[in-house]
Image (cartoon, rainbow, N blue to C red):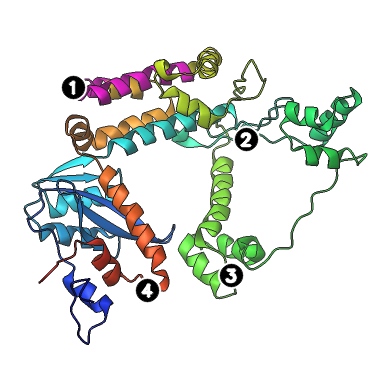
Amino acid sequence: MHRLGLGISDDTVLRQLKKRAQDTAAPPTVIGIDDWSWRKSQTYGTIIVDLERRVVIDVLEDRDVVTCTNWLKRHPEVEVISRDRCGLYAQAARQGAPQAKQVADRFHIVQNLRQAIEEQMNLHGRATGRALLSDADNITAAGNLLKSRLAHRTSREEIFATIHALRNQGLSCSEIGRRTGFPRRSIAKWLQFETPPDRRRAALKPTSPWYFEEFLSQSWKEGIRTGSALFHMIQERGYEGSQSHLQRLLAGWRRAEQQASDPKVEHEILKPVRDPETGHAISPVIAAALCIKPRGKFTPDQARKVDTLKTGSPAFATMRSLAMRFNGIMRGRQADPLPAWIDDAIETNLAPIMRFARTLNRDFDAVKNAIEMPWSNGQAEGQINRLKTLKRAMYGRAGPELLRARMLPFCHTD
């Protein structure tokens, strides 16, 4: 006990830790705010970091606008707030610290651009590595989304016929796997059959919302269409799955109704762009990553892919030009060219890029500050990693009070 500077008393070490946890000595003027998960995709807390002193100021139990607003109102000395693109913290900053400048995190801005590019490239289909298989129907959405993602849906008969045709040419299972992208074991299994084997569907369980399909369908027809309401109703009947799983089922029903009400949506099938060396379709994920990468950092293989993408996809060429201009703005630390960039992005008529540009425009001041000011949320992300380590090490004892005590600086006394 003496070594820890806690003294010998009736209090436990944990109680002493909670008592000795303190805020930073001086009021913070530049803070970073971010969320962290108690349980992933379910409940979240908030961490606040002093970016100048590189220490945690506070750990809040929830991720709520009111809680964050009240905290900021208790700290009127805050002058700069670095945050991610979450609208929740933007609203809290406006209400609780109107005097402070908001700074959007640069990493998240670039990440949002990459995601928009990936969404656009999904119109060319997802790369499965199965270069010899045909491309199927383009699943499109209605209304202002223009187009939706292209899905690779090939019949089992076509796959079966392709594998057997290659086998008849004398190719080994490994070679067929290299050409089609299928695992060698799967190919060997299919070659044992004369007709495509039937899919084995697992029996539905209470963890699946499809287990309650009849009840959900009847409730849907009766006008009960709110996900949370249906979730509680099937929970009473024994549903053991998550609400997000149910929402995916309901989203399919909503899309089907929307397409039925607007059958004039145009369908456009875009051919996937294939690597000339391998013949495999270039993944939208890879295409998006290459689109924002400077040419000087390319390997020869990456340079070949980018040239192929620019030739095979006019949209990629346009996005590549915009991405390089955007990188130049971010690295140049001057936000003056940003309004013109936003206007040009909106005029591309590429739905994901237009949506990204409009989001930048709505959050223009924070994005401008991110370009011109040195602050970012990197420190907050690092402190979240530390928090997760402590939380997992404490197992079930990682309550809000103890977690906060371990994250905050420790007050040593004589």
Q: Can residue 372 be seen here? A: yes
Q: Is residue 236 left or right of residue 395?
A: right
- Compare marks 4 and 3 and give the one earlier in the sequence: 3
Please state the extent of the stretch shown in magenta in the rendering.
315-340
- 3 or 1: mark nearer the eye: 1
* 40 sits to left or right of 138: left
Name the disc covering residue 151, or none: 2
**Residue at the image point whose x is 79% and y is 41% from the top:** 186
Q: Earlier in the sequence, mark 1 or mark 2?
A: 2
Which residue position holds label 3?
Answer: 239
Q: Amino acid at mark 3?
A: Tyr
The percent position of residue 221, horizontal first and vertical second, equals 58, 60
What residue is drawn where x is 23% and y is 47%?
90
- Mark 4 to mark 3: distance in Å? 29 Å
In the rendering, which numbered label is found on residue 336? 1
* Magenta span contains residue 368: no
The answer to the question of whether label 2 and label 3 lie on touching residues, with beta carbons closer than 8 A, is: no
Disc 2 marks which amino acid? Answer: Ala
Q: Earlier in the sequence, mark 2 or mark 3?
A: 2
* Gap between marks 2 and 4 measured at Cα: 45 Å
Q: Secondary structure at mark 4?
A: helix
User: Which of the two discs, 3 and 1, labels the residue nearer the N terminus?
Assistant: 3
Q: Which residue is mark 4?
A: 397
* Screen quadrant of the N terminus: bottom left
Residue 358's x, y, as percent? 31, 32
Q: Secondary structure at mark 3?
A: loop
Question: Was residue 327 drawn as part of the magenta stretch in this picture?
Answer: yes
Q: Residue at x 85, y 29 (%)?
A: 172
* Residue 383 place in picture, x, y as percent: 29, 52
